[in-house]
Amino acid sequence: MKLKNILFSTTLLAIPLILFSNCSQSSSQGKGTTAAATTAAAKTTTPANAATADTTTAAPVTYPPLNKKLYDSLMKRLAHGDTTGKWPVKNAPYPLPGAILPFKRVVAFYGNLYAKKMGILGELPPNEMLAKLKGEVRNWEKADPSTPVQPALHYIAVVASGDPGKDGKYRNRMPFKQIDSVLKLAKKAHAIVFLDVQVALSNIHAELPLLEKYLMMPQVHFGMDPEFSMKDGTHPGKKIGTYDAADVNYVSEYLANLVRKYNLPPKILIVHRFTKKMLTNYQNIKLRPEIQVVMDMDGWGEPDLKTGTYRYFIHNEPVQFTGYKLFYKNDIKKAPHHMLTPEEVLKYKPYPIYIQYQ
């Protein structure tokens, strides 16, 4: 399948934000995709008191030793009978105690509290949004009863913008008080939190350290979006950006240092992807016991296009774990006007262990 990129846009308050997570097989086809655990397994994952810790401080937590035999069996199960030899990924290190994956599947709501058009997280009133998230968690538990589900809020903390801003970087950093609001919402839902960064004309070295006071919390994880990493100076929205394995390794090492320094459970690192050039030299990504890397198929469109994107850019270029993004509105724009169900997503090889709704 040959895939070709198409663009779309959205807004944040009065500032135009260019968000274009989609791709297409051909111009004539229109828009397409862009973007088991037992009870014992659940006991080996992050304790509830860690996942719902205070938004500013967290007491030290002792995590049970990793059950390596169970871990190996779950990783084999995630491969879902794959016969290519790519899955499960070979020579990956065992995670530190307290790891969430693969003992639980993470189901996340994505967006920004300022913008109804950036995802379900900001589209609905908070209580309604949390109730809907709870419903999706139940749907996944029903579809795969053997894998407990960990709810999550995936918040865009740095947003690519159509406005250059005072420093000309075409990105907006969200105020800490809004991050605090997301942490409080997550605590109500017993959810973990992902802070997502769209660097635009800035870079990940400049943006990541600014969020350290949150990333030192055990319930806060990280997402990096190559789509808006504009290394050649192009304005976000004009083309799809890129990260290299070196960028992922920088983030991974930074987070690993926090894990060691603050005695944290492993951090989950989400890397969004829906084209080949969005991530170069994937084979050079370094895996660490402190970090669990998820390559998230971040794309929208009809089921066949999403399936192709997952096959070519997630299955065929294995890193560690896989994710899958579902769009309440964009996935149903084109015939057959259908957003995949959990049961349908669970037909993929390997099984996605991180699910994101936008």
Image: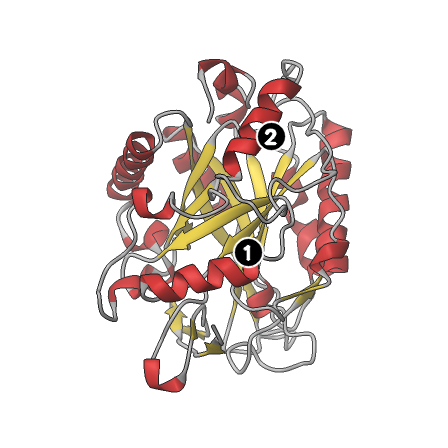
Which residue is found at the position 41% from the left and 43% from the top? Answer: 108
Q: Extreme front residue here?
A: 83
Q: Check disc 2 and report the residue beneath it.
A: 218
Q: Secondary structure at mark 1?
A: helix
Q: Answer yes or no: is residue 59 visible.
A: no
Q: Is residue 189 left or right of residue 82?
A: left
Q: Is residue 103 above or below residue 201?
A: above
Instruction: Report the Cα–Cα distance between label 2 and label 1.
Output: 27 Å
Examine the rendering and report whether any part of residue 229 can be seen: yes
Q: Residues within 10 Å of mark 2 (few under 14, many from 20)?
A: many
Q: Nearer the viewer, mark 2 or mark 1?
A: 1
Q: Tell me where residue 82 appears, x and y as whole percent.
A: 53, 44
Residue behind mark 1: 314
In-front residue for pair 106/315: 315
In this orientation, which residue lies closer to the viewer: 84 or 46?
84
Amino acid of disc 1 = Ile
